[in-house]
Amino acid sequence: MTEETGKSFARRDKLLEIESRVQKIWDDGNVFQADHKDTLPKPGEKFFGNFPFPYMNGYLHLGHAFSLSKLEFAAAYHRLRGANVLLPFAFHCTGMPIKASADKLSREIEMFGNPPVFPIVQEEESGEPEGKPEIKSEENQAQPGAKFKGKKSKAVAKSGGVKYQWEIMQSYGLSDEEILKFTNPYHWLTFFPPLAVEDLKAFGLGCDWRRTFITTDMNPYFDSFVRWQVRKLKAIGKIVKDLRYTIYSPLDGQPCADHDRASGEGVIPQEYTLIKMEVIGPFPSKMSVLEGKKVYLAAATLRPETMYGQTNCWVLPDGKYGAFEIDDNDVFILTRRAALNLSYQKLSRFPEKPTCLLELSGQDLIGLPLTSPLAFNGIIYTLPMLSVLTDKGTGIVTSVPSDSPDDYMALHDLKAKPAFRAKYGVKDEWVMPFEIIPIIHHPEFGDKSAERICIEKKIKSQNEREKLDDAKKIIYKGGFYEGTMLVGEFTGMKVQEAKSLIRSKLLELGLGVVYSEPEKKVMSRSGDECVVALTDQWYITYGEEEWKKAAEECLASMNLYSEEARHGFEHTLSWLNQWACSRNFGLGTRIPWDEEFLVESLSDSTLYMAYYTVAHVLQRGEMYGADRSSVKPEQLTDEVWDFLFVGGQYPKSSEISSSLLNRMKQEFDYWYPFDLRVSGKDLIQNHLTFCIYNHTALMPKHHWPRGFRCNGHIMLNSEKMSKSTGNFRTLRQAIEEFSADATRFSLADAGDGMDDANFVFETANAAILRLTKEISWMEEVLAAESTLRTGPSTTYADRVFNNEIDIAAKMTEKNYSEYMFREALKSGFYDLQAARDEYRLSCASGGMNRDLLWRFMDVQTRLITPICPHYAEYVWKELLKKDGYAVKAGWPEADSPDLTLKKANKYLQDSIVSMRKLLQKQISGSKKAKTPAADIQNKPTVGLIFVNERYDGWKRVCLNILQKKFDAATATFAPDQEILSELQKSEFGIEGNFKQIQKLCMPFLRFKKDEAKVVGAQALDLKLPFGEIEVLKENSELIKRQLGLEHLEVLCATAAAAAAARAGDYAPILKSNPPSPGNPTAIFVD
């Protein structure tokens, strides 16, 4: 919890009390409700922003809040500027996670009773550090609580913190009686969305809650919208039925898309060629049961073009294999995992049920003689390889040592190490006769590329993994893109051309089959490991050439606020292909023409931003669509949706009144297209790209999306946010712990780019202190109004402070408009606070100007409003007694900043800091032997500041040359020789010994060149853009006060004799450290 001295939460509680009051003011005034105007908006007059609706299987957390804050800050900025702003919010319930969780609860009751009594097997923790990698719970649900310590059940210990579903529900504070209700999946839909609304209102989200809704057929209005959308896509050929490989959950019995996965988001099927390596009889006794059948070791390869060079086959000696029936005659020996994948690809005697005739170990397979397709060696043998993976491919690996560094070193080790052969019972005749067969010419490493690169990299063993992985990348890349076939019917052909032809030949001759598996491990939310299945499914034809061109055109016109994001979208468009859009398990909308299936969760969320524009008219603010007093769901025909959203004809046969139809049409035309959609970067590869595709398919160009802003994930205190480690906060917890505005403050400070951001608790705590102290300061200023200086702001300090306010207003406007909220917080709050503090110090006895302070409080309040709206609204109404709402106050007026004045003030402040250090050094250096009392008594009281406002002599010559030789556009100089040549030709260079002149000038030339590269051409000016003597004299009282002096003189150092005379005994200091533009010399005397 937030802590202050003595564990007082008074400051935090004050902010929470303010937030509660302000939220009531907003609710009473319907401040965030947005309606269309009678005329279409001009650029900048309206802002429609939205956010991917969160999934409702748990509480909202800080990860949601971080992404959402980017939209909220942007919308609040546009609202403050006077735009008509629409920020709606809805809740996603489509898909399988809720249904899977409900079914889990039912299974747990069936297995362990009601309420369940789970078996507990106590196991000591290993004592590992707490900061382990995160293992997400299956539902990715919020599980509040402290870090796990002590003992834990065996079930929990094995899963790294994953609990039974009943325990997850208990962690929400639910009773056993309440949890029982969640066995009904639709109870989740009535429980979590209203709580999310409460949390978002407490967060201060500027949302038009009339437009909120949930998905699925529980909401008949949204259900109708989705049915129209998919019917429309099918009618124009964008949805087709096809037999395709897809990631599939055997437990759920359906494809497992990204949002259905507990892990493995973004993983796609990896297609291999399965090489059928026939076992030559007679079979060993352990395999006698297989006599009479054709038995193959089935090896998965990505490089069928290399099969000519096989010398053997690899297995893992202690690996677990099986002989699985493929059909009545063929048996494949491979891992059970691979057999399961094959069984879902119509390559099993019994579909989806692999039949194992015999379990085998890798050791059982060693020495088996094989005939392998295309291999020049008529017979090859099965040999041991310790690096074979059984969780990738089939656990059976072909060996081509000519082009595989791994194969070359493994075969080399077997040949060179008799003990290794003996350990696994490998006979010499299985290994020693087999030599490398050149099959591909590599442009850099020749015909035996694997051998050559292993020799060059000095790889001595198959265990040197790092070197071998590097070698493999080099050989495979060069061999594929630039290699040439040396053997076979495609001799002389480029490898990348021959590969597909050789693969086709193997498949046509029945020497291989197509095999696919997930490229990485994928776990469904139901808890099973996914396979790749060949399914007859409804697909959306993403990637179709003409459609892809339209999507690329849309992307090119969009503002993405990041080149990294643009590259991510371009990459996704380059590979994205048909997408399975139907499911037969879960919640959602039924596919209208095939009601056995549901529309999957990433396919009903691609166009719904349009639905926001009419949701409040249809549902009248009731999120479930239960209020049917406006329009009946059955009245929403395809003709009505066409009219509303895609320019269709007026639906004359509609029973909906023309006034209501026209109102909805006007709402859509006014708000569309949306201006900004904010999301985590992980949705680029699916949801956001789908959004582009669907808009280009169904809507005219002028309604295509205008902008996406993507961000990274959020860490908490520089560690990954993780439920299993306890480094986690729900949105509600964060608000209770820090307040909404301090949470928002820390979210703004966390970062703005595509990299992961960092929510720091210390920043949130500091925000509590800053905001409450600022309220106290303003209260004090307002109470002391009669003591403040009145009249025009004419002093130097006034002018500087007023200028800083202008700068803050302009810079913060720029930062907000570019959605750089961390920078907006810096320029609009931190920097402005620093300017105010400096102003207080500068004014001293003269006092601060009343009107200027009132302007500061007004401007600062407006600038912080998008980030801390409750605080701002409180200050606006309660302290400043302003009319209207802070959130709609308008952007503060500001003059163009006086940058010269800013430079002059920086010069002044830097000079004071420098002089203070010099004075302290002078006191401590000359009085070390004296007592403290003597120090104070003999402290200098007079300051002499010597100023030289203009470079002259040889420095002037050098600067004139550098000015000519500097390219301001590139911030670069001509070569040194060219600069020195100019110096030698100058009047100064001609007069004396050039070597001595060069020695004198080079340090100054280097210094000024370096300075110009940083600050630009102004570093080469002969004088500063302001009068130094004037600035110092005008602020002499400030300097005296800051340095504790009684008398101060500002002197011109160009009259050398007069300056030396005034310096007296300190003249040597003036000579050794002469003043120059921007660097006055100070001398302190008694």
Image: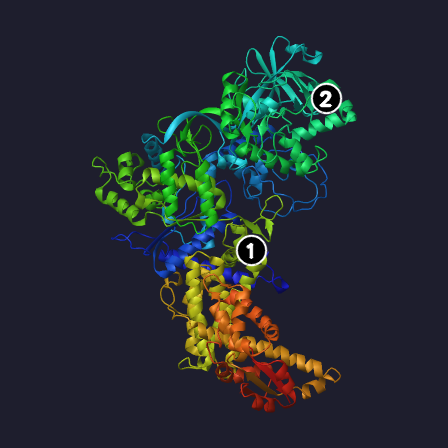
Query: Which type of secondary structure does the marked residue at label 1 adopt?
Result: helix
Amino acid type, mark 2: Met
Residue positioned most to the top? 292
- Location of the C terminus by quadrant is bottom right
Is 571 on the left or on the right of 407, as rendered? Answer: left
The quarter of the picture where residue 291 lies is: top right
Q: Position of residue 872 (x, y in %)?
A: 44, 63
Structural crowding at the residue carrying mark 2, measured as other residues with C-alpha within 10 Å and reported as few (<14), some (14–19) or many (≥20): few
Mark whose residue sits in front, 1 or 2: 2
**920 or 469: nearer the viewer:** 469
Residue 1049 picture location, percent across and down:
55, 88
Residue 731 location, x and y as percent? 51, 50
Disc 2 secondary structure class: loop
The amino acid at mark 1 is: Glu
Q: Vertically, is 835 above or below 752?
A: below
The answer to whether residue 61 shows anywhere in this view is: no
Q: Residue at x 50, y 46 (%)?
A: 60
**CA distance for labels 1 and 2:** 71 Å
Question: Earlier along the polypeptide chain: callout 1 or callout 2?
Answer: 2
Q: Which residue is mark 1?
A: 737
